[in-house]
Image (tube, rainbow, N blue to C red):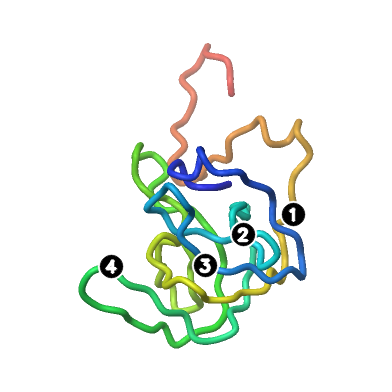
Amino acid sequence: MCDYSLHAVATRPAEVGETIVTTTFRGTSTRGFASEADMSVAVCLLPGTELAFADNVRYDNRWIWTRTINSRVGKFGKVDPHIPDRHHDAIEFPDGKYVLVTQLVEGQRATVLQLPVIQPLGEREHKPQIIAERQPTPPGLPIG
């Protein structure tokens, strides 16, 4: 929900319709989203959350350059979640490109348009499988 680097920051889940702002949280070097009402609390997004930015999205590498994405809408997701101790939170844009949340320029405003549908707990316990990668079960072995 929030990147590993924000574990020392107070957090809360995003709400549909609220305006969130990109910021660097005190005591960290990590950027993320906060509420306009309380910039000290990280607003955490679930993968699939849709956002509408007030302006075209700007991002940087903190030292050399700033770039602009010619888009105002994006969907929150995770990049390389299997690699520990690195930033995973990202915004994916309609053209398929993504930007890490920690690279978003500070002060950008976005409205939370839609949260993802959450499956009931019992349904989440099963990991989705990609049919093409599934190997046939040898005879005599239990399925699943």
Q: Amino acid at mark 4?
A: Asn
What SS does tag 4 mark? loop
Q: Choose mark 2 or mark 3, whichever is in front.
A: 3
State the CA–CA distance, disc 1 to disc 2. 9 Å
Q: Quadrant of the C terminus?
A: top right
Earlier in the chain: of badge 2 and badge 3, it is: 3
Q: Helix or strand or loop: what does disc 2 sit on? A: loop
Q: Residue at x 52, y 11 (%)?
A: 140
Q: CA distance from mark 2 to mark 3?
A: 18 Å
Assess disc 2: are there few (<14), some (14-19) or many (≥20) residues with their C-alpha within 10 Å of its C-alpha.
some
The residue at the far front in this view is: 26
Instruction: Indicate left or right for 130 with 99 as reference.
Output: right
Reading the chain from its start, which is encountered first: label 4 or label 3?
3
Identify residue type, mark 2: Gly
Q: Nearer the viewer, mark 2 or mark 4?
A: 4
N-terminal-most mark, 3 or 1: 3
Q: Quadrant of residue 48?
A: bottom right
Q: Residue at x 43, y 69 (%)?
A: 104
- Per the rendering, the mark at residue 117 is 1
Label drawn at residue 48: 2
Label 1 SS: loop
Identify which residue is drawn at 57% across, 78% down. Answer: 73
For the residues labelled 1 and 2, say whether their Cβ atoms are less than 8 Å apart.
yes
**Mark 3 neighbour density, 10 Å: few (under 14) some (14–19) many (20 or more):** many
Residue 125, image x and y in percent? 66, 30
- Residue ID for mark 4: 61
Which residue type does callout 3 highlight? Thr
In the figure, residue 10 lies in which quadrant? top right
Identify the residue under disc 3: 22
